[in-house]
Amino acid sequence: MDELIDLIMHEGDFHPSEEVVRQLLALGEEVHFGPKKAVIEFGHINRNVYIVKEGILRGVYFEKEKEETYGFASPGTILLSPHSYYMNQPAVMQFETCKKGCTCIMVPKAKFDRLLVESHEFARWMFDLAMWQFYTSEKKLKYIKGDARERIIAVLKYRPEILEVVSARTLASYIGVTEAYFCRIKKEIL
């Protein structure tokens, strides 16, 4: 648990006290998800907050008959559906496990909100994480652009931890290329 606390404390620029992180974790319960299972399901309301404890989740948009991988969540990542959490509307992005299952700490919205009110430090930390999300979205736009080969190189360079647990199909979706092309370029590079 100490390793998870350390990962959580160093997500973003503001580093909360260990006490605040432990308060957050104490509000939740551990939930296990098998391979390729939705944690937050597209089209459903899920107002809970999740903290990834073990495994990798992918964030995916479904557009018509196509799915597009937006990003990945690894241990220490805190995630939620803004549409569900904030507006009580169905999620527009799905978070699902990859090849292996995943363990998360699930914190109900009411408990999360209560901690936001009771702890200025916690509220400051959550604001920082929101800003971190904006930053990483812009960073992704900066690094995951260019031709397909450059995008593949960027993923291999900036997200090497996902290569073992994310399928080539999913990574190809994230980069915006076919699975065959991704595998060929990855083989050439590695």
Image: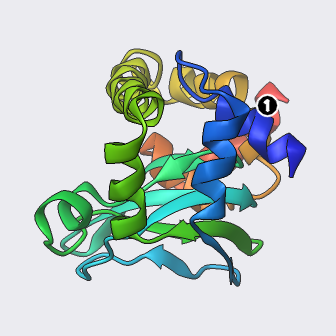
How crowded is the residue under tag 1: few (<14 C-alpha within 10 Å), some, or many (20+)?
A: few
Vertically, is 30 above or below 22?
below
- The x and y percentages for residue 117 are 31, 45
2 or 170, which lies in front?
2
Residue 15 located left or right of residue 116: right
Disc 1 on helix, strand or loop? helix
Residue 98 in view, yes or no: no
Residue 66 located left or right of residue 121: left
Give the residue number, with chain letter if any, for mark 1.
Answer: 188
Q: Residue furthest front?
A: 118
Q: Quadrant of residue 128?
A: top left
Vertically, is 115 above or below 99?
above
- The x and y percentages for residue 53 are 73, 58
- The x and y percentages for residue 142 are 39, 15
Amino acid bearing label 1:
Glu
Residue 121 in view, yes or no: yes
Q: Quadrant of residue 19?
A: top right
Location of the C terminus by quadrant is: top right
Vertically, is 9 above or below 139?
below
Q: Residue at x 19, y 61 (%)?
A: 83
- The x and y percentages for residue 183 are 70, 48
